Amino acid sequence: MKVYLDCAATTPVAKDAAKAMLRYSGRDFGNASSLHWFGQQAREGVEAARQKAAEFLNCSLTEVFFTGSATEADNLAVSGVINTAKKNGIVKPHVIISAIEHPAVLEPVKHLEKSGEIEATYLAVGKDGIVKTESIEKAIRPDTVLISIMYANNEIGTVQPVAEIARIIRDFRGLKQYPVFHTDAVQAANYLDCDTQKLGVDSLTLSGHKIYGPKGVGVLYVKKGVGVEPVMFGGHQEQSLRPGTENVAAIAGMGAAIAGLKAQSPKIKNDVEKLRNKLIDGILKNIPKTYLNGSREHRLPNNANISFQGVEGESILMALDQKGIAVSTGSACASGSLEPSHVLMALGLSHQQAHGSVRFTLGKHTTKEEINYVLKVLPEVIKKLRAISPLK
Ligand code: PLP
């Protein structure tokens, strides 16, 4: 039996997305900037995907920008706003992000802070993995140009009160331009409302491969009037904000994936949540010294992040892999690093607890039989690993 419980790393590719990719990798191979028929076929593919993204985000077509990944979209959202602020005469802009942002936001901010270009505030989260809105009010300064708080966390699945944060920022901003509010909605898009009008955000990031679409494509929504300078220079694609020949196949695949999200029945969310709850309850009940990381209530329906005392998460991952079960420790981006997850450390976990954590992320394909299989196999795996572990 093969059980894939790593949907936060990447999702399977939906049939419609694969079909769209095939079409624009084959028959309709043209360059979307070419004026002839072949080019126009490709252009139609790009614009149809933009239409789907705009409907999903409830925004206009000119507010949707395709990028080469969500990492690129996040970097653009951060650096683009900072560069504009500098052009507007703010010499050393101030930026606020949460301490549990994905590296795609965290690292560009750290990099710019290190090189002395900006000042940064990293907002702490509570033990529940949620940012306290009062801390945002306290951190905002007259020179704050950007606030970036992710909609849902990739490791622990906790959901931030984005609409409430947007309200606080709008109240502070009044008629001024800053601070701009960006949210990384990469993990949220499968399960939460991404209507940008309702959320009240100024920019928002999506990734193709977390929503049953292709890898290597992202979307950055930028509200009309928000100043985002390009970080790359070249042709005039994507209104010159993201130059480079469009990856038509990936964009069309992402469009199909977004259409799939829109068409998704709310029942899927409930079904996934029920199975996830069965998994959490089964583990906490049947395996001693196990702890759920992050809020149970304000959490994506498909995420279970659990610390197993006295065992290394990596060992659990390898042992489960041998049984055909795919899970992850922390995030896929952090694998290969010996540092404990910055997200789990921000929750106040010890190094040992952080290293002993495993992330299970379900998808719409997950079945009751698969969860039963995990619950059958896992207690024995943990028992065996604990017996040989030097950790206590
Ligand atoms: N933001 C979040 C919250 C993510 O989970 C990921 C991927 O793990 C990214 C950004 C980066 O996405 P991409 O792989 O498209 O660059």
Image (cartoon, rainbow, N blue to C red):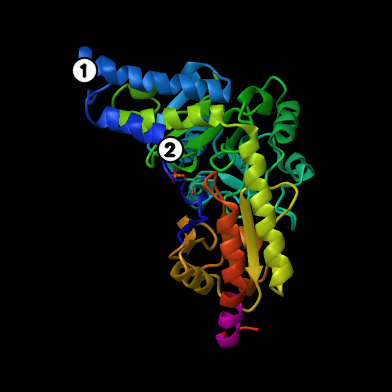
Residue at left offset 45%, top offset 64%? 324
Give the total of numbered labels.
Answer: 2
Q: Which residue is mark 2?
A: 14
Label 2 crowd (10 A; few <14 / some 14-19 / many >=20)? some
The residue furthest right is 134
Image quadrant in which you'd find residue 188: top right
| Whole-percent x, y for residue 281 in the image | 72, 61
Helix or strand or loop: what does disc 2 sit on? loop
Front in this rendered view, residue 169 or 384: 384
Task: Give the vertical position of 213 relative to 173 (above or below).
Answer: below
Instruction: From the viewer's perspective, tell me whether residue 98 is left or right of residue 235.
Output: right
Name the front one of labels 1 and 2. Answer: 2
Q: Observer-nearest residue: 323 or 10?
A: 323
Residue hosting label 1: 38
Residue 80 seen in the figure: yes
Q: Amino acid at mark 1?
A: Phe
Other residues around mark 1 within 10 Å, as few (<14) / some (14–19) / many (≥20) = some
Residue 26: image quadrant is: top left
Stretch of the chain drawn in magenta: 382-388
Q: Is residue 196 above or below residue 130?
A: above
Please name the residue shown 31% across and 18% down the image. 43
For label 1, the SS is helix
